[in-house]
Amino acid sequence: MIREERTVFLTLLTFIVYAGLQWLEKGAFLFPFPLNEVTLVVIFIYILVLNRNSITTIFWIYGSVLLFKLLSQQFFWTLFLSNETLEIFFATLWTDIFYICYGLSFLGFSYFYLSERKKKNFVLFFLICASCFIIGLVINEAILELVSLFSIIVYCYRFKPNRIIQAQLVLFLVLEMGKQLMLLY
């Protein structure tokens, strides 16, 4: 297990133990989901610093996915803005624009990440995953986004993945699944 995978494993273990303790204590599955995006960006920056000599374009594209996902969350803005400013800020379309940028950057990331596999059928697979992701964004159904992300992880795992990006994608998937599990439970 490489150090990036250990970092992801320890992060996931921390979040799962916290949620499990909350379940035992309060009888409800409480995942600290407002911290998902912040955690993803912090882990990404940590891994970026560790691998500063071997950074490729796919790292920067994935970083833009995480940045736009972070900026599209209202919780993030509550850390920096006052209540009056928040009301004005949320009345505008900024979080929606960041969410659209997140969707576009995720599509770009998934295309480049899938194209690294050098397989003939990656275009068809990309179109299926992209359409599932876009439908999930449009109808605001996060389960479809998770299906798309899970499909990309499984597909790339078969064809010698970039282990660093793959570990971060698994972290992204599990944190988002925890959020959805908490909303369902």
Image: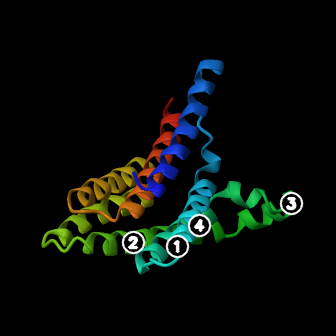
Mark 4 residue type = Ile
- In this view, the mark in front (3 or 4): 4
- Can you identify the residue that label 3 sits on? 82
Secondary structure category for the residue under label 3 = loop
Picture quadrant of residue 149: bottom left
Question: Mark 2 and mark 3: span between their CA atoms?
Answer: 34 Å
- In this view, the mark in front (3 or 1): 1
Residue drawn at point x = 53 percent, y = 35 percent: 16
Residue drawn at point x = 50 percent, y = 40 percent: 178
- Can you identify the residue that label 2 sits on? 109
> Total marks drawn?
4
- In this view, the mark in front (4 or 1): 4
Mark 1 residue type = Ser
Q: Residues within 10 Å of mark 4 (few under 14, many from 20)?
A: some
Question: Mark 4 and mark 2: span between their CA atoms?
Answer: 17 Å
Question: Mark 4 and mark 1: span between their CA atoms?
Answer: 12 Å
Where residue 180 sits in the image (x, y, percent)? 49, 41
- Can you identify the residue that label 4 sits on? 45
